Image (tube, helix red, strand yellow):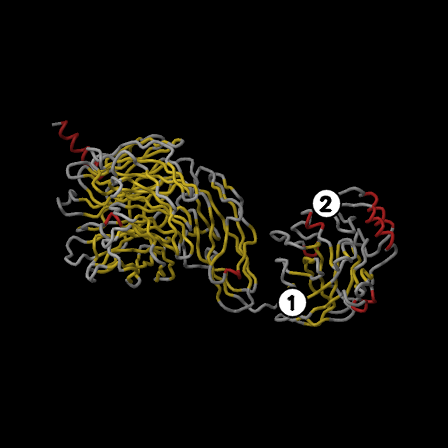
Amino acid sequence: MKNVLRLFVFLFIMQFGFTTIAHAQRTITKGSHQDFREGVAHTLRTARLSDNKILVTYKESSSSTSDLYAIAGTVNSSTREIAWGTRTFLGSGYGTAQDIVALSSTKAAIFFEYWPSTPDTMQYCVLDIDGTDITKGAITKFTDHQVSYNASFRAAALSNDQVVVCYETTTDSRLLAMTGTVSGTTITWGGAATFNATDAAFTAICRLSDTKFAIAYEDDDNSDRGQIRIGTVSGTTITPGASAYTFNTGSAVGALAITALGEDRLALAWEDDGDANDVAQVSLATVSGTAVSFPGNAPSFLQNVNSDLTISALSESEVIVAMSAGAGSPDSYAYCVLSGNDFSVSTDVLLNDRAEDASVNCLTSDLFVISFIDYYDAEGAGAQYGMSKVFTVASGSYPEINVQGNSIDIVSGDNTPTTADHTDFGTGATLSRTFTIQNQGAGTLTLGSNAVTITGTDAANFSVDTQPATTVSGSSSTTFVIDFASASATSHSAEIHINSDDIHERDYFFSITAEGAASSNVRAQIKVFLEGPYNSTNNEMNIDLKTAAVIPTTSPYSEDARTIGSIPAEIVDWVLVQLRSTSDGAAVVSKSALLHKSGSIVADDGITDYIELETDADDYFIVIKHRNHIAVMSAVVHSLTAGSSTLYDFTINKNKYWENDAIEVDTDPQTIYGMYAGDTDALGTVDADDRAATWNDRNKSGYENSDCKLTGSVDADDRAVTWNNRNKSTKLP
C-alpha cells in the first residue's frame, strides 16, 4: 500500500506540483500546469514578448470552422505562475499551417494558411498588445502560394519592423522565403526567393542579425538530409547564400528547430528519422558570411519525437529543447550545455503522457516557459487543455539588461511614452533626459562603443549627448543622455535602440517623444580670425590642435565651462562669445563656442554656421574672447533675433572692430583682419609676463595657453608673437 501511495504522490507532483531537477551546471525547478483554455485542438504557437510575458496562438477543437485565438500571459518567476489575459478571436477558416513572431513587447504578427479561398492563400494579421489585452489588425493576404505541410511553414522577426517567412509550396514543392516591413498593422512585402528547388517537408528559421537569417530544412531529394542555408536582406529583397550545408550526413531528418546563440553561432535540434527510436539530436553551427560549419558533436537524447520539437536559448552556451512524444511515451525537455563546440545534455519529463505542439520560450537566462496541448489532462481525458509550465533556473553568470528612466523600468518595445519615466521629454525648445542601463545579471554586459542609436520619424531632433560605458559588470549600471532640440511647437517622436550581448534583448528599444517650443534664443552668425593659427597660403586657420587631438571637450572659459561629446572636424579652438546691451556694460550672456578654420563660429556639430544664445531679441555689441589672443568687440550694435541671423564679419575691415582694434593677417588678394595673438594670461595686454610664459613653457606640448600659434607645442614662433605684439592692449571699454 505504501508503494502505491508513493507512486501516486510521484505522479501527482510530476503532473501538477513544483519539482526541482538537478542538471549539469545549473538546477531547474518547474512549476505546476497553468491552463489557459479547454478545447485546444492543435497548431499551438508561442512567442516571447518580454522578460515576463508570453503570447500563445491556437485553434479550438470545438470549432467546425477552425477558429483561431490569441492569449497573452504575465509570468511570475517567484511563484512560477502565469496570469492569463482574455483570449482574442482572430478569425475562422484557418488551416494547420500557422506561426507567430513577436516584434516587441507590444506588437506581434501571426501568419497562417486560409482555407476558404480557392486556392488556399497565405495571410497575416498584426497584433497590438497592451498588458495582456490584444487588439488585432486587418487580416490581409500576402501571397497566393499554398503551404504543403504545417511543419514546412515558419516565421521570424529580424527587427521590430521587419519579418521573414519561409514555406514549401504545394504547386512546385519549392522552399521559398519572403520578407516584409511592418508599419502599424500593415506589412509591405518583397518578392519570394528560392532556398531549395525540391521538397522540404520540415523547416526552421531564426534571426542572426537585422539583415541576416538562417533556414534549416529537410531535403527530400537528398535522402532526407538536414541542410542549412543563410539568407541576407536588403530592404525587402532576400538573397540566398550560394550554398546549402548538410548537418546530418548519416541519417534522415524529421522535425527541426533552430535558434541563434549570437550573430555567428546557431544551435540545431532535430529528430533522427533514421533511428528506430526517433531520437533527438543537438549540434552547434558556426556562420561566417553565408558559409556554415559544424565543429562539434551531435549527441542523441530524447526518444520518440512526434513531429513537434522546439528550441530556445537560455544563454550563449545553453539551450532548452522541448518535444512531444507518441501516445504512451513521456513528453520531455532537455537542458543542453555547450562546452567549447560540444553539447552535453540532461533530460527531464514534461508530461507523463502524450502532448502536442510543445513550444519553449526562454524569457531570461533564468526563466523559461513550455506551452503545449495536453491530451490526457487529469481534468478529463481527451479534454485537450492548452497549458503552460514555468521553469526557473539557478542564477548563472550571464548579463541581463534593463533600462530605467527616472528610476522607473522601461520595457523593451515600449511604445507609450510617459513623463513619469522620461520617455516623454515634455515641452521645450531644448530638453535633455538621462536614462540608466542596469545589468541585473551576474555576468558582464557588453554594450560596445556607440551602443545607443536613434531612429524614427523625427530622429534628427534628438541626439545622443553621452554614450553609456562599453561594459557593465554584474549588478551595476551606466547612464546615457539624450538631447532634444526643436523651435517648432509640434510633437516629435523617435526610437532609442541599445545594442548589447543580452541574448534575449540584443536590440533593446523604446519610443520617445517631445514637444518643441518656439525658442527665445537669438541666433548669432559671426566670422573672426585669430592671428596665431592664421595661414595666408590658404586664407584660413590651421587646425593643428584638432589634428593633435588636444582640444578639450570641456570649454576652458569659466563663464561657460560646458562640455560636449566630441570636437568636430576642422575646428581651430574654443572661443567665448558675449553680448552687451551697451558698449561699456556687463555681458548679458556668455557662451563658449567652436571656431571653424574658415573663421565661422559654429554650433556643436561643427557645421551649422550660427550659434544660439539665451537672451531676448535686441541690438547687441558682440565681444569675442580667446585664451591667448586680445579680446575684441564689434564697432557697432548688431541686431539679433530668434528666427534668423545676419553675418557680422570681423575679418573684412578694421572698422568692424571697436576702435579699429585689429591686426592685418593677410594682404593678398585682399586685406584680412584678425585678433592680436600673445595675451597668454588673458589679462588684456601683451607684456613681459606673456613673453616669460612662452620662454618658461618652451618645448611643452599639448593644450597650452603659451602656445600662441596653436600648433600643439610651445616654441620660438610663440615667443616671436609675444615680442612683435608687445604692449598691445585690448580696447574693450
Instruction: Check disc 2 and give the amino acid type.
Output: Gly
Q: Choose mark 2 or mark 1, whichever is in front.
A: 2
Q: Position of residue 714 (x, y in %)?
A: 79, 45
Query: Closer to the camera, 337 or 422?
Result: 337
Q: Position of residue 28 (x, y in %)?
A: 31, 35
The quarter of the displayed image where residue 432 is located:
bottom right
Query: Closer to the camera, 4 or 537?
Result: 537
Instruction: Check disc 1 and give the amino acid type.
Output: Arg
Q: Quadrant of the C terminus?
A: bottom right
Q: Secondary structure at mark 2?
A: loop
Q: Position of residue 649 (x, y in %)?
A: 74, 67
Q: Which of the marked residues, 2 or 1, is nearer the chain's N terminus?
A: 1
Q: Which mark is residue 523?
A: 1
Query: Closer to the camera, 176 or 312?
Result: 176
Residue found at the very far left of the displayed protein:
1
Q: Which mark is residue 71?
A: none
Image position of 425 (left or right of 531): left
Q: Which residue is mark 2?
A: 702
